[in-house]
Image (tube, helix red, strand yellow):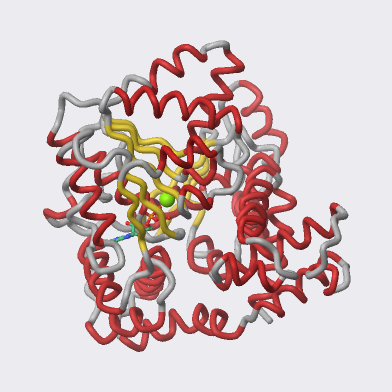
């Protein structure tokens, strides 16, 4: 099957010259490059089942097993596909995922999609948020401010580790206000996005519009304020936005992975303002809440999972809710690929890989692997040496310790020669930022992680 693109322009030219080869080989090349960029397990679950359906009119049409895959891949892997296309000098090519199978009929609970002007995730609602002892204060606080914006707790500050529901709660507030208080202007933004917006505004000389925009909201939902760390200019802008909105009795809700005063390099005047209202934490869910969450997710995904299989997942996946969700999604993916019924046996099989790795690995093993990968003595990781190479290796080791073992910052700091928890937090942020900016570095970290996971 040969491909000749009939379109005009440089994409057409590229087609004619570069792609006079078998379509399937093009696809193979793309897949192989993607495989280098993501962990093996994710690759096997999400990328391997994809099939090339067509390659025409400057568009790569990829078949996925079902609609569920499309959502997942677009959210998690689209940027990697785009990066690969760029690396193959195909950045003019569009990519579209289609489903082999139609989505099952949605239930009434699913059909809560707000009007197209809403910026909020339709599924992130209070109704879909399972409440337990671990999150009841954050839930109640969020509901109260959604019902009475600017009147009860201001600001509301929600903190907790990754995957415990901070973003879900912010969107729930957004959805609620959007639906019930149509006169109010509500805005959700993550600190990362607002940073980029600010930089663009500075570049384009449109800072006054930027300032104006963020002073115009009745409800301001700011996600992941730990990201403000060390961003002095952004802190300055947020300080003024905060004061303006607060003085006008507008509702402010903030989330973070730690308490305001524990965010490193955050100005004192901001940290103290963030703590003016109600501070509510999110803790990892207990067993009963994990079961309830799994049931809720199964209902939302419209999939039947027998009770014993659900209990098995809840017993074995304890970290955070995102991991619970990934487990269920993995089970669904495997079941739909192999047309198998979901039962305890299938669940055990699906989770065995995840569980095997999470049980075995220890912090000293992570340190050893990183030291080896960076070609430095193990003792240097635990020392106070400040040469750039050693510092980077130490930061990567701290990041991987957090990522793989989800240990508390303090504990990680202790294992690296008694470093402060803020040093560990900074290290993790630094590595995450580098991974986002630098593809090569990202691959390197993934490679080390893979070596650790495979023992
Ligand atoms: P965070 O922002 O804290 O990292 P998210 O809000 O993104 O976490 O939550 C991760 C996933 O877990 C989301 O898909 C969210 O819907 C789900 N989730 C978190 N908490 C709950 C909960 N209490 N009930 C149901 N789903 C939850
Ligand atoms: Mg979040």
Residue 195, by quadrant, is top right
User: Residue drawn 71% across and 38% down?
Assistant: 18
Q: Position of residue 178 (x, y in %)?
A: 20, 34
Q: Position of residue 183 (x, y in %)?
A: 16, 24
Q: Is residue 402 left or right of residue 371?
A: left
User: Residue drawn 38% across and 51% down?
Assistant: 71
Note whether 312 is above or below 290 in the view shown.
below
Q: How many marks?
A: 0
Residue toward you, 62 or 355: 355
Q: Quadrant of the C terminus?
A: bottom right
Q: Would you say residue 214 is visible in this rendering?
A: yes
Q: Position of residue 266 (x, y in %)?
A: 56, 41
Note whether 335 is above or below 386 in the view shown.
below
Q: Position of residue 214 (x, y in %)?
A: 39, 23
User: Residue drawn 27% across and 50% down?
Assistant: 124
Residue toward you, 272 or 53: 272
Residue toward you, 126 or 441: 126
Q: Is residue 147 left or right of residue 226?
A: left
Q: Would you say residue 31 is visible in this rendering?
A: no
Note whether 295 is above or below 390 in the view shown.
below
């Amino acid at each position: 099957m040969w491909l000749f693109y009939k379109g005009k322009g440089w994409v057409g030219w590229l087609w004619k010259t570069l792609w006079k080869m078998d379509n399937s080989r093009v696809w193979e090349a793309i897949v192989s490059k993607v495989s280098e960029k993501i962990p093996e397990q994710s690759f096997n679950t999400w990328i391997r089942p994809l099939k090339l359906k067509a390659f025409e009119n400057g568009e790569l049409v990829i078949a996925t097993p079902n609609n569920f895959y499309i959502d997942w891949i677009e959210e998690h892997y689209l940027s990697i596909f785009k990066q690969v296309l760029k690396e193959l000098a195909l950045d003019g090519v569009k990519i579209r995922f289609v489903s082999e199978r139609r989505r099952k009929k949605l239930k009434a609970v699913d059909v809560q999609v707000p009007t197209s002007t809403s910026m909020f995730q339709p599924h992130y609602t209070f109704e879909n948020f399972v409440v337990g002892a671990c999150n009841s204060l954050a839930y109640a606080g969020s509901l109260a401010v959604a019902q009475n914006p600017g009147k009860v707790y201001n600001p509301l500050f929600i903190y907790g580790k990754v995957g415990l529901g901070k973003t879900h709660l912010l969107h729930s507030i957004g959805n609620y206000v959007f639906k019930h208080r149509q006169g109010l202007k509500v805005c959700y933004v993550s600190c990362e996005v607002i940073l980029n917006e600010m930089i663009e505004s500075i570049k384009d000389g449109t800072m006054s519009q930027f300032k104006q925009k963020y002073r115009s909201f009745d409800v301001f939902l700011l996600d992941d304020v730990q990201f403000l760390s060390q961003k002095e200019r952004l802190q300055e802008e947020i300080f003024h936005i905060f004061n303006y909105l607060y003085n006008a009795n507008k509702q402010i809700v903030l989330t973070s992975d730690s308490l305001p005063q524990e965010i490193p390099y955050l100005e004192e005047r901001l940290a103290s303002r963030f703590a003016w209202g109600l501070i509510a934490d999110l803790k990892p869910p207990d067993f009963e809440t994990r079961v309830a969450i799994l049931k809720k997710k199964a209902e939302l995904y419209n999939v039947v999972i027998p009770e014993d299989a659900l209990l098995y997942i809840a017993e074995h996946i304890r970290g955070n809710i995102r991991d619970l969700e990934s487990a269920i999604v993995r089970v669904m993916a495997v079941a739909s690929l192999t047309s198998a019924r979901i039962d305890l046996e299938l669940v055990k099989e699906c989770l065995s890989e995840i569980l095997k790795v999470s049980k075995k690995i220890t912090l000293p093993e992570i340190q050893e692997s990183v030291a080896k990968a960076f070609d430095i003595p193990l003792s240097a990781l635990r020392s106070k040496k400040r040469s750039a190479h050693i510092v980077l290796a130490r930061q990567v080791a701290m990041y991987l310790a957090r990522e793989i073992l989800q240990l508390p910052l303090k504990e990680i700091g202790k294992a690296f020669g008694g470093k402060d928890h803020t040093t560990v937090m900074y290290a993790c942020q630094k590595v995450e930022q580098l991974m986002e900016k630098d593809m090569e570095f990202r691959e390197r970290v993934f490679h080390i992680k893979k070596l650790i996971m495979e023992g």
